Image (spheres, rainbow, N blue to C red):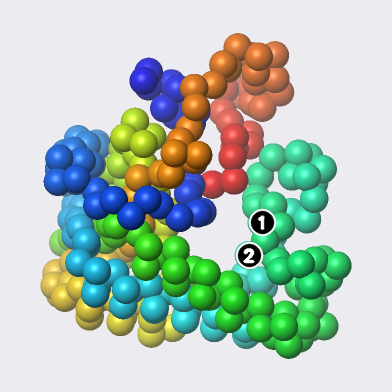
Amino acid sequence: MEFLDVVRRRRTTNGPFRPDPVTPEHQRLLMELAGRAPSQLNSQPWRFVLIDERATIETIAGISGASMTEAMSNGTFFERYKPYFRFSADEMAATRSGMLFDKLPMALRPFTKQVFTPRGQKLMNTFRVPQTLGEENRKLVAGSPLLIGVMLDRAEYRPGELSSFYSVFSMGAAMENIWLATVELGMGIQFVSFPMEVPGRWAEIESLLGVPDDLELMAVYRLGYLPADQQRPAIDWSSHERKRPSQYVFRNTCATPERGWDEN
């Protein structure tokens, strides 16, 4: 697969993976590609922990699902992220950014636009929507054959100093290499973010993984092979050529993306 096609086909996987374990060869390849990312002065501040032990994955899944339920129940999630939600295909097409909010249970869909109001929050809690979504989240994480924890060396990650910016920037490059590699390998990947949304939950994962004092756990991702019907087919991008110029703003002769191609 050519590199440009890989970039164009990159996506976040919001659904389940196949139960097949991620092969040792592919695990080593992902780590090799992460290590080939650029870093300030070749500092290579990243450290990774690969988790395929079922008991550990199940525990992290439980933390993630409970975190989602809590953040959804008390309204902090919707309050924090409401600028990113879109409520129709037309709105999504107009903004070309954010997330299409179409996953509510059928009984609540007539009230979709009220989720950011006290009445909407009360309705969601009455119908136990946070619990439903939290359980779905738990199942997704629990069904993942592999989790990857990403850590930064505290010698480099010093908030408030330039070295901290450099290390986070480098970590992003390393993770992008992994993300793009999943396309080539027929895999999917998703950020396990909800434990970061609830105070104390992230510390539980740090303790579970035994993160050393000299490292900072920055993120956890779930990975696995995509089901056959979710495999990304080759795309003929020639039909998109006429649309691309409208997606860029030209300033000082440099073209920069104005809006993303997908939801994440």
Residue at screen point 57% across, 16% down: 236
**Residue 136 location, x and y as percent?**
52, 69
| Side (left or right) of 77 relative to 89 | left
Task: Report the amino acid beneath label 1.
Answer: Tyr
Q: CA distance from mark 2 to mark 1?
A: 6 Å
Residue 172 visible in the shown view: no
Task: Report the amino acid beneath label 2.
Answer: Tyr
Q: Which mark is residue 81?
A: 2
Q: Which mark is residue 182?
A: none
Residue at screen point 22% across, 80% down: 207
Dot 1 crowding, Cα within 10 Å, few <14, some 14–19, many 20+: some
Q: Which residue is mark 1?
A: 84
Quadrant hosting residue 7: top left
Residue 236 visible in the shown view: yes
**Residue 242 location, x and y as percent?**
70, 14
Of 18 and 126, nearer the camera is 18
Residue at screen point 78% across, 45% down: 89
**Residue 122 location, x and y as percent?**
76, 86
Of 126 and 32, nearer the camera is 126
Disc 2 vs disc 1: Cβ atoms closer than 8 Å?
yes
In the depicted structure, whether residue 10 falls above or below residue 147: above
Residue at screen point 76% across, 67% down: 106
Of 221 and 110, nearer the camera is 110
**Residue 224 location, x and y as percent?**
34, 50
Helix, strand or loop for disc 1: helix
Which quarter of the image is occupied by the N terminus? Answer: top left
Residue located farthest toward the right when viewing the structure as drawn: 110
Dot 2 crowding, Cα within 10 Å, few <14, some 14–19, many 20+: few
Helix, strand or loop for disc 2: helix
Quadrant hosting residue 107: bottom right
| Side (left or right) of 151 relative to 137 | left
